[in-house]
Every structure is written in C-alpha cells, then in structure tokens.
Amino acid sequence: MNDIMNLFSLNGKNAVVTGANTGLGQGICVALAAAGAHVFGVARRSCDETAAKIAAEGGQFTEVRADLSDFAAIDSILEQVHAHADRIDILVNNAGIIKRCDAIDVTPENWDAVDFLNEKMVFFLSQAVAKQWVADKKGGKIINIASMLSFQGGIRVPAYTSSKSAVMGMTKALAREIGSRGITVNCVAPGFIDTDMTRVLSDEQKDHLQAQIPLGRLGSVDDIAQSCLFLASDAGAYITGVTLHVNGGMYMG
Ligand code: NAP
C-alpha cells in the first residue's frame, strides 16, 4: 500500500472551491491547502479571512472573484484560474443558498434563484471543467455539496430540498457518463453543521435537532472539510457516484 500520508497528499494539485469566503467553503479550502493543493477560492466578496488562515499554515491560495448568480461567472472563473495554473485537478461545488418559505407561498422567483445557484451552476461549472479534462485526458475529481435534505425533505425549504436532490442525481449521471475519462464525481451530504446557514436556528431548534443526532452534536466545518479531502485525494480513488452522509448518524438511509 502507498505510504498512508501520501494517499491524502494533494501536492502539485490545483483545486477550485466555490463559496470560499466563509463557512464550509472556507474550511474546505483550508483542508485542501493543508494537504498541499494550490486552492483557488471562488467568491463574490473578499476571501481575506480564508487567505489568512491558509497563509498561516504556509499553504497556497488565490482568490477568484465571481458572482455565481450570473452565467458569465463560468468563463471568468476559468480565465482567472488559468492566469495562474495550467489545469484544474479538483472542483468543489460548495456555494449554495437557502430561502426559507412555506411551500404554499414559494414564488417562481424564489424557486429560480435557489435552483440557478444550487443546481444549474453546479452542473455547468462542472461541465466546463470536465470539458478540459476530457480534452487533456488527465482526469479530475468533482465534489458537490448536497445535503441531508437531499434524502429527507426539508420543512419550509422546498426549492432548496429539490435543488440538493438534483445535485445528487446529476452527480450520479456525470459519474456514470464520464467515469471512463478518469473523472470521479461525488457528493458530500452534510447534516446540520454550525455555519451561518444554521446560525439562524433558535437554541430550542438546535437542542431539538441535537437530540436526534446519535453522535450528540451538530457537525463542524472540519467534519465536512475532511470528508472532501478524502474524496479529493488518492484515498478515495475508486469512489464515484456516491453521496457520503456526514451527519453524525442523524440520517442513515
Ligand atoms: P454559508 O455560510 O451561507 O455559505 C454559503 C456560501 O455560498 C458563501 O460563501 C456565499 O457567499 C456563497 N454564495 C451564495 N451565493 C453566491 C453567489 N451568487 N455567488 C458566489 N457565491 C455565493 O453556508 P454553508 O453552511 O457554508 O454552506 C455551504 C454549502 O453547504 C451550501 O451548498 C449548503 O447548501 C451546504 N450545506 C450546509 C449545511 C449546514 O448545515 N451548514 C447543511 C447541508 C448542506 P456570500 O458570503 O457572498 O453570500
């Protein structure tokens, strides 16, 4: 077997991570950089905090400014990355939004905004990167951030739930269709993780959730980041089309 540390090494790899300025995206950037990758963090605002965390550990990070609610972001991201790197080796589609609203009140505008960012951009950014991988025949790894709600359904988040189920479906479709080109496509499906997205929950709601988690706590950013590192590294080389539950056992389906 390969040296165990080398299995997780991303030395010499270039990784693009969306939603890099905060939350899970920031943690994923830090983890991939700690494993040796040059991380290109995509965000619509400053990634100074992420850059500082990575610099403190001697890692490599380049900020890529793009607003993923605009389709033009795809070409812009590729252009900005290729100004510094020959190729992308890893793509983590992490950026996402949630709009809470009773199902009976959801508007088409609400639905489209969530769907565009969480689903359509995930597919078309993946497509753009995969096109390069098919052309250069060197393969690559895509990791999408789905959700426990991809399986469970969520209350007051119908567009979000739908988009995250779609992410899981497109992961399988891509994994099956382009696996022969040396490309793996997987999802990480977080449960309830302590980030801005869940900070809006009341203490009462959090206590209620925690009581349903066999491991007895909300997840941390590191819990998700380490799962992404596994799938991005050679340690996960023979895994594709999978959605990895990272939820403390709250959902085991
Ligand atoms: P977060 O703290 O709200 O981060 C979301 C990220 O997406 C931010 O960087 C945000 O940038 C970015 N983003 C949103 N709209 C964008 C746009 N138009 N262009 C570029 N970037 C945009 O949430 P998080 O918890 O870290 O979530 C990260 C991913 O994990 C999401 O896909 C989410 O659905 C998924 N997830 C989270 C949990 C959880 O419990 N936290 C559970 C399951 C799945 P701004 O700061 O500029 O808005």
Image: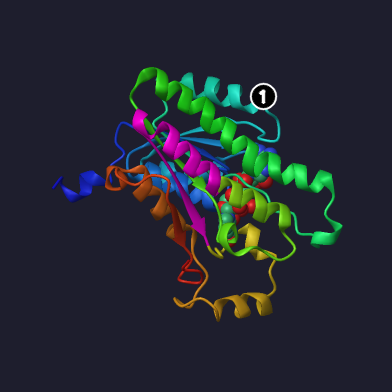
Which is more toward the observer, 1 or 154? 154
Residue 184 picture location, percent across and down: 39, 39
Quadrant in the picture for residue 77: top right
Residue 41 picture location, percent across and down: 52, 37
Quadrant in the picture for residue 42: top right
Query: Which residue appears at 65% of the width and 64% of the height?
Result: 199
Residues in magenta, as a range: 168-190
Q: How many marks?
A: 1
- Which SS does the magenta portion mostly show? helix
Q: Residues within 10 Å of mark 1 (few under 14, many from 20)?
A: few
Which is more toward the observer, 118 or 240? 240
Q: Please state which amino acid type lies under the numbered disc 1.
A: Ala
Residue 243 picture location, percent across and down: 46, 53
Q: Is residue 7 left or right of residue 244?
A: left
Magenta segment includes 197: no
Magenta segment includes 177: yes
Q: Which residue is mark 1?
A: 72
Q: Is residue 85 visible?
A: no
Residue 51 picture location, percent across and down: 49, 40
What colour scheme was applied to this rendering of the protein? rainbow
Q: Is residue 47 left or right of residue 138?
A: right
> Cβ of disc 1 within 8 Å of ligand 1?
no
Query: Which residue appears at 30% of the width and 43% of the height?
Result: 237
Q: Secondary structure at mark 1?
A: loop
Q: Is residue 180 visible?
A: yes
Q: Is residue 99 left or right of residue 211?
A: right
**Above or below for 5 versus 100:** above
**Above or below for 71 versus 155:** above
